[in-house]
Image: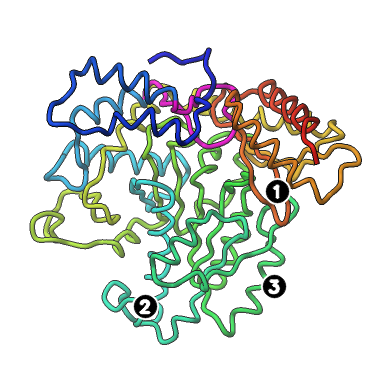
Amino acid sequence: MSKHKSIPICSKASPEEMAADLKSLVDFQDEGLTLLALNRMVEKQLIPHLMQYDQPGFQSMFNAYPEEGAKYGATVALYFNQGVTNWQVSPGGVMLEELCCKAICKLFGFSPDADATFMASGTYGNQEALYLALHKQAEKEGFDLAEKGLKGFKDPSRLIVLTSKDAHFSVKHAARMLGLGEECLRFLPVDSNRRISVHKMKEIIMKLQKSKDIFCVFITAGTTSTGSVDPILPIAEICEEIGAWLHVDGAYGFAYRLVLEWNYLFEGAELADSLCWNPHKQLGIPIPNSLLFVKRWEDFGRMTVYSDYFNRREDSEPNPGLKSPPSTRPFSALSLVTSLRYQGITKVIERLRAPLVAIKMFYERLKKEDDIEICHQPDLGILCFRIVPDGYPEKELDNLQRYVYDSIMAERERTISLTKLDDKIVLRVVAIDPVVTTKALMETISRVKALAKEYKK
């Protein structure tokens, strides 16, 4: 398929127009279409409405087209359609996944006792991590969570999870799914760069420890809104002191540990009890491709459910399905393996470094712009800012940001995103693909300024 360099990032169709175009695709009939007719229909009616992730103006989300080596692996996986739940279903697929997990643990500098499993997304990785943390807390209280559930706790209302106010919303999903409810979450303040304030975290722990059981601390290595990396090492030391499970949500940012100049941000990651990472974000691996790491391989045993027809207790072969819930698992490891082997780690690091450098230089350029308010110093490849024309009334600034965002998204020549930091609506740009250069980002700023001048208060 061509790169579509001469067309907008996506069609300008409204939801109603798009539905009208796509309706015939889901008009299921008794007689089928030829592949040629189907191809023409898809090319004409669907593809124009898909987002073109390889454009320099795509500066809004964590998506990328498949890298060439990854595309090859995904093609093989699709052709053979292997399930990799257990050895009986796909011996080769299972063994490659097991070897890949160990190799990735080594690549990131985890201990030989560490292990990983492939997941459908970081959301599911976060859910499983919170379950593992809760299971460990149950063990401290002398019972098996898998058998008794929450009723095994003498007072479930004492259970508390500490997390950043900027944490991904999947932590709320995890609390809901486990039956803990969002009331178990305590949101920690952040500093000026949107990282958890360790000093304030200690103060909060002091106040909570007598009345609550802090069984898990959930931090982020690359927050969704700003890309900020919470201070992992000092928080790991605190968790060791209070006996809490430490989970690091590195879905977006953890790959950047491989980039030497940014490695320091991830100091202490190897001390985390669990950590999730999504290769389908920074590396251009086909979706879904996510991993959950644990510091001790035996921690996955808390997830294990045996059956009579496979994943039997007496089986000696490796069975990835014992590490996580899905009993049907795609061959996700293959596209990651073929991508890393095709590129080599040196080129992978170059790919990762490019957007970080672009955002860093972009930040330096924006500091010189009088009508741009920068909201944080970027840790990784995300920067939030506001357009603030001279003399503009504060009460209208949120509406101005929304207008600029809506206008840019309607034009479809580029994309940005909108988020909220504390009580302010802010604009947000993301660099994932190396094609998003500082020049492309500055072109976005030019458009932002032009649109701001058009806005009528």
Gap in angstroms between the C-alphas marked 1 and 3: 29 Å
Residue at point 39%, 53% (across, down): 124
Mark 1 highlights which residue?
425
Residue 240 in percent (x, y) is at 54, 67
Residue at the limit of the structure toward the left, as seen here: 309
- Judge the density around disc 1: few (<14), some (14-19), many (≥20) Cα neighbours within 10 Å: some
| Circle 2: element type | helix
State which tag comes first along the sequence, 1 or 3: 3
Mark 3 highlights which residue?
203
To which quarter of the image does residue 99 belong?
A: top left
Query: Would you say the residues marked 1 and 3 are in contact, meaning their CB atoms lie under 8 Å apart?
Result: no
Quarter of the image that includes the C terminus? top right
Residue 346 seen from this side: no
Residue 197 in percent (x, y) is at 69, 60
Give left or right: position of 222 versus 306. right
Give the residue type that dot 2 points to.
Leu
Residue 120 in percent (x, y) is at 35, 46
Give the residue type that dot 3 points to.
Glu
Q: Nearer the viewer, mark 1 or mark 3?
A: 1
To which quarter of the image does residue 35 belong?
A: top left
Q: Nearer the viewer, mark 2 or mark 1?
A: 1
